[in-house]
Structure formats: structure tokens, C-alpha cells
Image: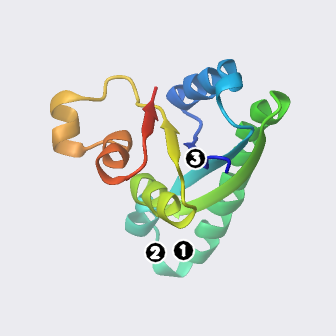
């Protein structure tokens, strides 16, 4: 059985470093991976009038799909066979949902620089939320 590996990605510098690290260590990682991009819709919920939400969600979904396809290209070029998944929601909750639904065995995630300590206590971080909640191992970059 091939382990199911989830790699949440976005356009951050942290995700770029995570992507590069995974590709550098490609001999240790199965070729079939699940790349997840989450379009954070918290701001849409708060700032966009109800009448415009459908249009904004559709636009966010198209933009998110373009980002996901762009970020998948280096994995394809390195010989991976990524499955792509786009979610709308809050990143931490969406990652936890996908881990549960897709029977994920390992999550590979980056942690944004400057995170940690008091900031995480007050505001949390996606990586910390994932580490605390999932039942599978997490590889943190």
C-alpha cells in the first residue's frame, strides 16, 4: 500500500521552501501525492455583501485553481504524480477535513517564519492547528 501524503500549498515563501525541500528529497517520498490549496474565505464572509458572495466565491475558486495548477508544475517536472484538490474555507479546518476524508498517512507542511511563542498562543497557526489535531505524522518545514 502506498502511503497517502498531503502537502498543503499556497503562494507563500514558506510553501516555496517546503516545495523545494520535498523535491530535493524526492527519493524518500512516494510519487503520488495530494496537493491541497485552500482559498481562505474568512474575509469574504465578513466584508462582501450577501448579494455579491456567489460571484466572489466563483472568482476565488477560479483563482485558487490557477494557483494550484501553477504550484503543481514543479512537482510534475520532478516526476511526481500530484492529485490536486482545492478547498474554500479556513486553511486549518480544510486541511483537517481533507486528512480525515482522504485517509492521509503523512502531512508535509511549512511553518511561516516568525510564528511561534506568544503569537501562536494568541492567534494560533495553521501548522500548530494541524499538528495538534491530526492522528497521522506531520513533517514540518
Q: Residue furthest front?
A: 1
| Residue under the image location 37 percent in, 44 percent down | 126
State the CA–CA distance, disc 3 to disc 2: 34 Å
CB atoms at circles 3 and 2 under 8 Å apart? no
Residue indicated by mark 3: 6
Q: Residue at x 41, y 31 (%)?
A: 111
The 10 Å Cα crowd at callout 2, few under 14, some 14 to 19, many 20 or more, is: few
Image x and y of residue 130, in percent? 37, 48
Decide: marks 2, 1 in contact (CB < 8 A)?
yes
Foreground mark, 3 or 2, reads 3
80, 9: nearer the viewer: 80
Q: For marks 3 and 1, give the CA distance.
A: 29 Å
Going by the image, does 13 lie left or right of 121?
right
Give residue 86's quadrant in the image: bottom right
Residue 75: percent from left, percent from top? 75, 33
In the image, residue 58 sits, relative to residue 93, either above or below, namely: below
- Mark 2 lies on a secondary structure that is loop
Query: Residue 7: x and y, percent?
Result: 58, 42
> Disc 3 vs disc 1: which is toward the camera?
3
Left or right: 138 with respect to 75? left
Residue sitting farthest toward the bottom: 51
Label 3 crowd bin: few (<14), some (14–19), many (20+), radius 10 Å: many
Closer to the observer: label 2 or label 1? 1
Picture disc at residue 49 = 2
Mark number displayed over residue 53:
1
Instruction: Please give left or right for residue 73 compared with residue 20 in the image.
Output: right
> Which residue is at the front of the view, 139 or 127?
139
| N-terminal label among 3 and 1 | 3
Which structural element holds mark 1?
helix
Residue 47 picture location, percent across and down: 41, 64
Q: Secondary structure at mark 3?
A: strand
Pick the front one: 89 or 22? 22
Amino acid at each position: 500500500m502506498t502511503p497517502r501524503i498531503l502537502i498543503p500549498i499556497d503562494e507563500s515563501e514558506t510553501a516555496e521552501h517546503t516545495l523545494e525541500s520535498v523535491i530535493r528529497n524526492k527519493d524518500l517520498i512516494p510519487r503520488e501525492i495530494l496537493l491541497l490549496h485552500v482559498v481562505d474565505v474568512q474575509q469574504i464572509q465578513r466584508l462582501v455583501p450577501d448579494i455579491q458572495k456567489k460571484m466572489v466565491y466563483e472568482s476565488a475558486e477560479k483563482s485558487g485553481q490557477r494557483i494550484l495548477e501553477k504550484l503543481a508544475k514543479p512537482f510534475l517536472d520532478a516526476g511526481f504524480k500530484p492529485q490536486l484538490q482545492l478547498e474554500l474555507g479556513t486553511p486549518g479546518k480544510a486541511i483537517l477535513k481533507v486528512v480525515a476524508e482522504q485517509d492521509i498517512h503523512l502531512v508535509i507542511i511549512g511553518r511561516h517564519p516568525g510564528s511561534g511563542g506568544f503569537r501562536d498562543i494568541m492567534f494560533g497557526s495553521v501548522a500548530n492547528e494541524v499538528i495538534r489535531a491530526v492522528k497521522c505524522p506531520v513533517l514540518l518545514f
